[in-house]
Structures are given as structure tokens and as C-alpha cells.
Image (spheres, rainbow, N blue to C red):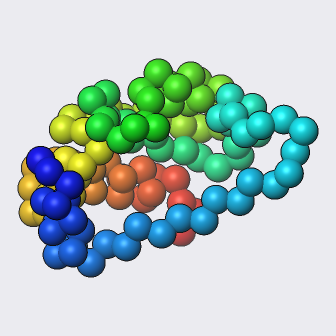
């Protein structure tokens, strides 16, 4: 799928890609391997083995996941990073089902 097609999907979905990443000045560069052993929140990693995003590295995600000391769940999902955009669709429904089950099971409500 071409980038222009992705843009059309984003426009219809109403989804906004906004992220704020704060990188404080430290003597050591950021590394997921240094941060994840300090995670305290229950964590769901939904990872696409064939993710087409440049920095979405399956092996790095797995190694970081293995370092998390708290309750966690790993879930492989097919069709890459953007397979989840197609609503309605089988992969979108799968992702929503897994995520909502994780939240219901792990949020104190």
C-alpha cells in the first residue's frame, strides 16, 4: 500500500498521531533495555512480527519485554503495524478484543 493510501485511511478514521517523548539530559543515551527493568505498570505488548515501521524491531521489543519485572502479556498480531487500521475488519477486531480484555483484567475498577 502506498503512503497516500495510508493518509486516506488516517483521514477517515479521525485518528491523530500525536506523541510527546521527553528525553531528559542524561549521561547515558536512551535505551529500552535500561528503562524496562523499572516498569511498574501491568503491560501488554501487541507486536507484529512483520511490522513495516522502520523502528519497530521485533527482537528489540522481545528483549525489552523479557526485562519487565511486573505482570505482562505478549501478543503477536498478524498483518503488520497498519493492519490494525482497517475498521471494520478482522485484525482491528482482534486487536480491540485483546486490548479490552487486558484492560478489563488489569485495571482496578
Rendered location of residue 51, percent (x, y): 31, 35
Rendered position, 3 above or below 40: below
Spot occupied by residue 89 in the image (x, y as percentages of width and height): 9, 56
Locate residue 44 relative to residue 35 in the image: left or right: left
57 or 45: nearer the viewer: 57
Q: Nearer the viewer, residue 109 or 15?
A: 15
Name the one closer to the observer, 109 or 39: 39
Q: How many marks?
A: 0
Residue at 40% of width from left, 38% of height from top? 54
User: Position of 79 compared to 30: left or right?
Assistant: left
Q: Quadrant of residue 47?
A: top left
Q: Residue at x 21, y 35 (%)?
A: 78
Residue positioned 35% across, 41% down in the render = 53
Residue 91 in the image: state x and y as whole percent: 16, 47
Residue lying at the far right of the rendered structure: 27
Please determine whether, in this image, residue 75 is positioned above or below residue 94.
Answer: above
Which residue is at 71% across, 59% downward?
Answer: 22
Horizontal side of 36 relative to 81 (left or right) equals right
Q: Is residue 10 left or right of residue 55?
A: left
Can residue 79 be seen from the camera position used here?
yes
Image coordinates of residue 99 in percent, x first then y, are: 36, 53
Amino acid at each position: 500500500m502506498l503512503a497516500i493510501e495510508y493518509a486516506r485511511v488516517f483521514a477517515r478514521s479521525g485518528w491523530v498521531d500525536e506523541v510527546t517523548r521527553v528525553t531528559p539530559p542524561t549521561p547515558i543515551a536512551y535505551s529500552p533495555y535500561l528503562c524496562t527493568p523499572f516498569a511498574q505498570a501491568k503491560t501488554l505488548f501487541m507486536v507484529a512480527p512483520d511490522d513495516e515501521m522502520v523502528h519497530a524491531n521485533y527482537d528489540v521489543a522481545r528483549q525489552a519485554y523479557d526485562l519487565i519485572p511486573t505482570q505482562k502479556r505478549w501478543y503477536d498480531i498478524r498483518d503488520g503495524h497498519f493492519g490494525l487500521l482497517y475498521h471494520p475488519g478482522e485484525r482491528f477486531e482482534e486487536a480491540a478484543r485483546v486490548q479490552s480484555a487486558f484492560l478489563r483484567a488489569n485495571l482496578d475498577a
